[in-house]
Image (cartoon, rainbow, N blue to C red):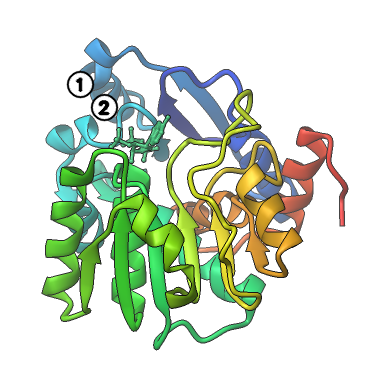
């Protein structure tokens, strides 16, 4: 019988998850369908009950439900607990288990695209929301040299500094202007905020005037493919990594949790680029 997978979010109209997962099911000959469900915040519990009642095999969870769903699952794996959010649900014989593949998806894309060893590197994180928490947890689990945090609301970086301490990784909070003056200190700069996302494509979260040429600058945003931050980094000789890799790698890791099979990440990337109207290389 055809298995059913889905996405719980609000809104979900522009999500590219159905496209990439349905394509992967088709390519791999897996009898399954993936559907985006627009779930209003007041119906999160009912949506999870629905997974059980309809025997849906698995789901992704996106904004704004990644934290809310946690209350209604049977088990949450360690990494998702540490991040404090779930983006993947697996229905294992009626037991709903929560995972989070966002951070690991990001770190995999960073390593694949830069072919750099980041274990000794100095990292600057811009932002302190849910996206930052996933990325920082995965970076700390992987290993980094040291990590600094800057955010519009500076107090929100405190839990991230605390998390780094748990991993015995040196860390600090830094004002944006101070970071901008000291860009020479960083090997990797990662934007986890929504600043620069379409339609606000002329905004950038950080001035890169003092960027050193071999710094990796990365943005979780993939629409536009090249944010103002990445454009500036390129102009100054930095290496850039956009958000597509994270998107497809988190999807691929979810797919693997559900099916036990690794999908073709290059194909997933092509699907997303085609949908965005970019190149297909
Ligand atoms: P997500 O789950 O996508 O990370 P979030 O938890 O709402 O979303 O976090 C959004 C991040 O982008 C935060 O770091 C936020 O800064 P604040 O903590 O000060 O709110 C940051 N952000 C959003 N809009 C911003 C803006 N216009 N300028 C600077 N930072 C912004």
Q: Nearer the viewer, residue 47 or 191?
A: 191
Q: Which numbered dot is residue 45?
A: 1
Q: Are discs 1 and 2 less than 8 Å apart at CB?
A: yes
Question: In percent of the image, x 33 and y 12: which residue is there?
Answer: 40
Please tell me in which quadrant of the rendered image residue 62 appears: top left
**x then y, percent, for residue 235:** 75, 60
Q: Is mark 2 within 8 Å of ligand 1?
A: no
105 w.r.t. 37: above or below: below
Q: Quadrant of the C terminus?
A: bottom right
**x then y, percent, for residue 217:** 57, 63
192 w.r.t. 14: above or below: below
Q: Which residue is mark 2?
A: 48
Please tell me in which quadrant of the rendered image residue 58 appears: top left
272 w.r.t. 104: above or below: above
Question: In percent of the image, x 55 and y 41: which residue is there?
Answer: 204
Q: Quadrant of ligand 1?
A: top left
């Amino acid at each position: 019988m055809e298995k059913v997978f889905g996405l719980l979010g609000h809104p979900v109209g522009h999500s590219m998850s159905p496209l990439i997962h349905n394509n992967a099911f088709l390519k791999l000959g897996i009898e399954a369908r993936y559907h985006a469900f627009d779930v209003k915040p007041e119906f999160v519990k009912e949506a999870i009950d629905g997974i059980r009642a309809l025997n849906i095999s698995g789901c992704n969870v996106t904004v704004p439900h990644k934290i809310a769903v946690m209350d209604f699952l049977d088990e949450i794996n360690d990494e998702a607990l540490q991040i404090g959010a779930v983006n993947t649900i697996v229905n294992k014989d009626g037991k709903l288990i929560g995972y989070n593949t966002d951070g690991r998806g990001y770190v995999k894309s960073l390593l694949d695209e830069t072919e750099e060893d980041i274990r000794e590197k100095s990292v600057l994180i811009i932002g302190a929301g849910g996206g930052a928490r996933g990325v920082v947890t995965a970076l700390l689990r992987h290993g980094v040299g040291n990590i600094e945090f800057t955010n519009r609301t500076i107090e929100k970086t405190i839990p991230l500094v605390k998390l780094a301490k748990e991993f015995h990784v040196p860390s600090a909070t830094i004002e944006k202007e101070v970071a901008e003056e000291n860009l020479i200190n960083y090997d990797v700069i990662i934007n986890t905020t929504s600043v620069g996302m379409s339609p606000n494509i002329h905004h950038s979260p950080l001035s890169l005037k003092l960027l050193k040429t071999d710094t990796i600058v990365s943005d979780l945003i993939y629409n536009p493919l090249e944010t103002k931050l990445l454009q500036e980094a390129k102009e100054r000789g930095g290496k850039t990594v956009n958000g597509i890799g994270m998107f497809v790698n988190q999807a691929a890791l979810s797919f693997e949790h559900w099916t036990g099979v690794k999908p073709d990440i290059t194909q997933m990337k092509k699907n997303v680029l085609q949908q965005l109207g970019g190149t297909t290389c």
